[in-house]
Image (spheres, helix red, strand yellow):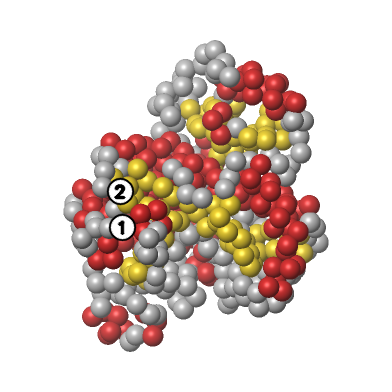
Amino acid sequence: MSTEWIPGPEQAGLADAVARLRAEGVELVEMSFVDNAGNVRVKAVPLDRLPAAARFGVGASPCFETFTFDDVMALGRYLGGPDGDLRLVPDLDRLVRLAALPGWAWAPADKFTQDGSRFVACQRAFAARQVQAAADVGLTVLAAFEHEWALGAADTDEFVPVLTGPAYGQVRLEATADYARELVSALREQGLEVQQFHPEYALGQVELSVAATDPLGAADDALLVRHTVRAVSRRHGWRASFAPCLVPGGAGSGGHLHLSVHGAEGNLFADGSGRYGLHPAGEAFLAGVLRELPALVAIGAGNPASFLRLEPSRWAGVWQVWGREAREAALRLITGTTGTQQWAANAEVKCFDATANPYLAVGAVLAAGLAGMREELRLPQEISGDPAALTDDERTAAGVRRLPTNAAVAAAALEESEVLADALGKELHDAICTVRRAEADRFADADPAELAALTRWRW
């Protein structure tokens, strides 16, 4: 991914791609980007206009950089307001026919200015920079998001679950058997490798995971998976929601991020001399992520409704601690079974949800981990069990701290993070803080039912 885009001849092979898509019945191409509130924004062109879009880009206002989740424009120090224009340039390497939306294809877009330079606050470029920063020190990172969503009735804005039966139960699987088969087939047609599908715990909830890839690709995959889920759900007469909370007081849906870090010695989370096979560099990476978790919450789960899900004793990862297979910890180490460690060992950031911009999520976690490696940080004592069962004094003695409990505290933590401010750059960092502060201020007095209703069908 270049730092400059100079309008020029059509990219090699584009004419063949257009001819192939036309033969497959494609008439329109959607180009998407994700704003700092986690909303996916789109522009679309007829297939015949794709070469022009690839050559000159498609116009988009930079005002979206400071839009809140409910489409209210805030104003930051550097970005926001009605002026200016950007060019959205589709990444043709990810161009794909949408199997569940006949006649459509999709590609993620990068943001450039009108003079051809990279837009300073392009979230996808931020993720790519962090991938390159890892590569510059000899590291390869693999990542994937878990996808949890709830299926509700399509004829109401309330949430009426269409599935009943026990959590993880066969009864739920039977009710979604045809749906799951069609969904997995559509994802496979789009080049994604599905690793698992199963009913989940919350009302009407199911989960799907795809194979890990490079972090930028993982963020692209997250958009494509959710897009496909919503389309297939509509075809079955259902409505899919990835929102963190549909019914206050109950379990919600997360968007956990899994990643592994590989160097010359292999997986840095396996076969090392440290705890559970961690290499020193791998431990330092995780320690960096652990240190920045309060600020990372603002990026990965900073919506006001996210904190309806972030409650203790729900496996939501609300504690700034780590542990092997510790499902109440925000940072969970997964070592894999005997014989699989080199390819299976990974870490899971459990506090994230699908309100996050996935490009910001993967980029920020990488930046935090790389800072930990530069500083040769070490992990504290791990935890086991549920920290909520400890007294306040016991938690203090064990160094167990609660992550931010509301959007304002999370925004303040991000504002104060020197590591993330430096990695994001002043413009992008300020834009994210602006959005999160504006949402926190406007919804400070909203009750849980109001927040759930406002966000229920936005993701």
Instruction: Find residue 106 and report its image quarter.
Output: top right
**Label 2 vs label 1: CA separation?**
8 Å
Find numbered disc 2 in the image and state the secondary structure of the residue it sits on: strand
Q: Nearer the viewer, residue 278 or 102?
A: 278
Tag shown at residue 177 = none
Q: Which residue is mark 2?
A: 266
Check the picture and name the quadrant holding the N terminus: top left
Check the picture and name the quadrant holding the C terminus: bottom right
Above or below, comparing residue 250 to residue 242 in the picture = below
Instruction: Find residue 325 and report its image quarter.
Output: bottom left
Task: Write the residue at 38% across / 49% down.
Answer: 364
Q: Nearer the viewer, residue 328 or 194?
A: 194
Q: Is residue 18 left or right of residue 329?
A: right
Whole-percent x and y of residue 272? 24, 58
Q: Nearer the viewer, residue 273 or 303?
A: 273
Instruction: Find residue 270 and report its image quarter.
Output: bottom left
Whole-percent x and y of residue 73? 55, 46
Above or below, comparing residue 203 to residue 228 in the picture = below
Whole-percent x and y of residue 427? 39, 39
